[in-house]
Amino acid sequence: MTPSALAIGIGAAAKAFAALTVAAAVLVLWLASPAFPQVAISAEQEKELYTALLQARIPNPPPASFNASVGMEVPAGVELYPMPGEIRIDPVRRYRFTVMLDEVVLVDPATRKVVLVLRLPHE
């Protein structure tokens, strides 16, 4: 192998290694980030929010077949409602919600992904 061929081979290997390093760094950052926004509210705030939103009058509740879980995308046919003005819990103000029987579902309006499901509190 000639010196110039060896230099080309080493240069290509270095570029491949650099690309692999960048790809690995991106993967690590992606794995470290949450798949959905985290809603950081206290148990007392959850209870307050649950009670207030459960009493909200929504004209079109989701169909009985709707089963929400955190991270899932809400189907386009499910109507989402803005947070009522009396809700003063800052971390949830930007979300939309719907109510299904005894569940309150908070949804990120930008992605339509469920960020929090509040169920009947157990005392």
Image (tube, rainbow, N blue to C red):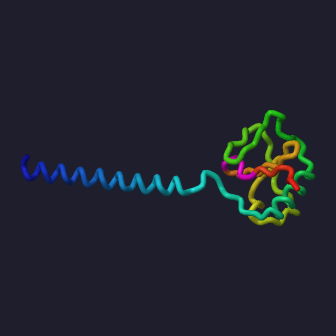
Name which residue lies at 46% across and 52% down: 27
Taking the image as shown, residue 79 lies to the left or right of residue 71, namely right
Expressed as whole percent of the image width and height from the top left, the position of residue 65 reads 80, 33
Task: Determine if the magenta segment contains residue 17.
Answer: no
Name which residue lies at 86% across and 58% down: 84
Give the residue at the far top of this rendering: 65
Name which residue lies at 10% across and 52% down: 4
Q: Which residues are magenta?
A: 111-116
Expressed as whole percent of the image width and height from the top left, the position of residue 106 reads 77, 51
Quarter of the image containing the C terminus? bottom right
Give the residue at the far front of this rendering: 123
Name which residue lies at 87% across and 46% down: 102
The residue closer to the viewer here, 45 or 95, is 45
Expressed as whole percent of the image width and height from the top left, the position of residue 77 reads 77, 37
Expressed as whole percent of the image width and height from the top left, the position of residue 45 reads 82, 63
Q: How many badges with numbers are in the image? A: 0
Give the residue at the far left of this rendering: 2
Q: Main SS type for the magenta part?
A: strand
